[in-house]
Amino acid sequence: MKFTLLTVMGIGLSFSCLAQEKWSLEQCVAYAVKNNVSVKQADVQARIDRLTLEQSKLALYPSANSQHSGGYQFGRSIDPTSNQFTTNEILFANHSLNLNADLFNWFRKKNTIAANDYSSQASAARFEKARNDVALNVATGYLAALLSREQIHVAEVQVQQSLEQRDNVKKQVDAGALPELNLAEMETQLANDSATLIGAKTDFKLKLLQLQALLNLDAAAPFTIDAPPAANIPVLPLSELEPALVYNSALEHLPQQRINDLNVKAAQKNVQVAKAAMYPSLSFFGGLDSRYSNAQKLLPANFQPGTIPIGFVNVNGTNYIVNTQENIPTGFNKNTYFRQLSNNFSQNLGLALNIPIFNGGQARINWKKSKLNVTMQELQKEQDAQSLKQDIYQAHTNAVAAIEKFNASKTALASAQKAYDFARKRFDVGLLKPIDLITNQNNLFKTKINLLAAQYDYIFKMKLLEFYKGLGIQLHN
């Protein structure tokens, strides 16, 4: 689902919003999405999964590694260049370059890439879901703050009416037309209405603080909200939000459903990855190698024929020396470091066939586990779909009830307003006691508050259905 709650926002939104006096719902959502910790965590996890996918793609290429070592050996040891036993102290060095490439492994790497690709897409959808969850929470807090602000307006009107009535009664008491008891009753009502107004203002401040907490905004920062009156907030007709229609749209647009689909596909690919581990694999290898030892300090350079005694034989009691002809070195060159590396240079190429025979059942058990994981992901998908359908049908039922309650509240307000108007006229001509007027006034105040609560409850229930349908939550056309 496209993140419809966000409009065009620049990178510096978090700083520009702080300088504004009033925040719209869109600005609150944008700021919360950018600064919420859970959203940041989901973003980091999405980037980690993308790197995992990138690494699995690079694993298709042959691996090449170069090893270099050097050391000092003493005592009885083997000369690494001549492979002869020696007691000399030797300074040695070894250098090698090895190459390895998989030729065939039953598409294990290919399926790993596919599984990681699905997991990366699921992680991206999970990031989108985190943003949507934050947006929904912010919208809920924003509407609660709007309701609290409207209750302040109603309480202010109530206080103003009580003040006017108190002043009117006071004039009549001063003129001797009414007893002081009436004035005391009016002053008590004014005090109660003033306390209600103070409570409404306090509740509004608390709602703002709660909204700031959702935004991860400093509680000490200046903050207030700006939105159209409830009557101007656009709401789709209930006929366009039938639960079956909303459910089908939610399956297509909500991130959680894409997450489940992608998790199932990733699990299915991992089954093939686990199965490949039970079959032989063929790979190619090659390498370069050379070594150096300071035990070989000299290297013969020139030779000449010579006679070398190798023993003797006894003939009739007489020993005769036995000689052999060999090339005897007459000149030597230093066997330098690079000359030894050249003389000791070796290469190797080959094929390696790895046949799994018995490994404690690890490969087969992993394969069976991967198949069970597919079943687990499919069950999770089914459970989430059932929960989503239940939530949507419940939200629709609540919306219908909210509409009926809102309409009933409007009827109740009209009746309460009419009763108050009649009571006020009778009070003005002295036909009604102040306590009876106060009762009608309090009934009217409660009815107005109930109407506001029903109105915003109706708006939220309808906006929730719009959210499930994939339309986001907006307070403007």
Image (cartoon, rainbow, N blue to C red):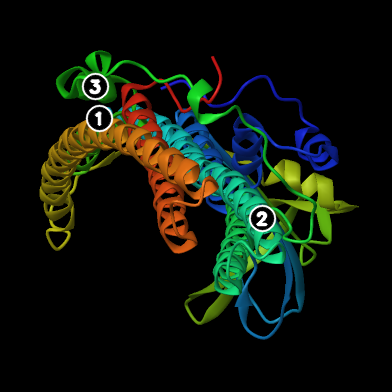
On screen, residue 379 above or below 467: below
- Give the distance between the C-alpha atoms of the residues marked 2 and 3, in whole angstroms: 50 Å
Q: Which secondary structure, mark 1?
A: helix
Q: Which of the pair 439/305 is nearer the observer?
A: 439
| Observer able to see residue 160 | yes
- Disc 3 residue type (three-letter): Val
Q: How many neighbours does mark 3 have within 10 angstroms: few (below 14), some (14-19), or many (20 or more)?
A: many
Q: With 125 as the anchor, is 374 left or right in this view?
A: left
Closest to the camera, between mark 2 and mark 3, is: 2
**Which residue is disc 1 drawn over?**
261
Query: In the drawing, what numbered circle is on residue 5?
Result: none
- Tell me the quarter of the image containing the N terminus: top left
Q: Residue at x 17, y 35 (%)?
A: 397
Query: According to the image, label 2 marks what residue?
Result: 163
Q: Position of residue 254 (x, y in %)?
A: 34, 28
| Residue type pointed to by label 1 | Asp
On screen, residue 236 above or below 281: above
Q: Give percent across and percent down for residue 302.
A: 85, 45
Determine the secondary structure under disc 3: helix
- Of the numbered discs 1 and 3, the one sitting upstream in the chain is 3
In the rendered image, the vertical position of residue 155 relative to residue 422, given as above or below: below
Tell me what residue is drawn at x 18 percent, y 24 percent.
Answer: 243
Neighbourhood count class around disc 1 (C-alpha, 10 Å): few under 14, some 14–19, many 20 upward? some
Residue on which the image places disc 3:
246
Crowdedness of circle 2 by 10 Å Cα count: few (<14), some, many (20+)?
some
Q: Position of residue 135 (x, y in %)?
A: 50, 38
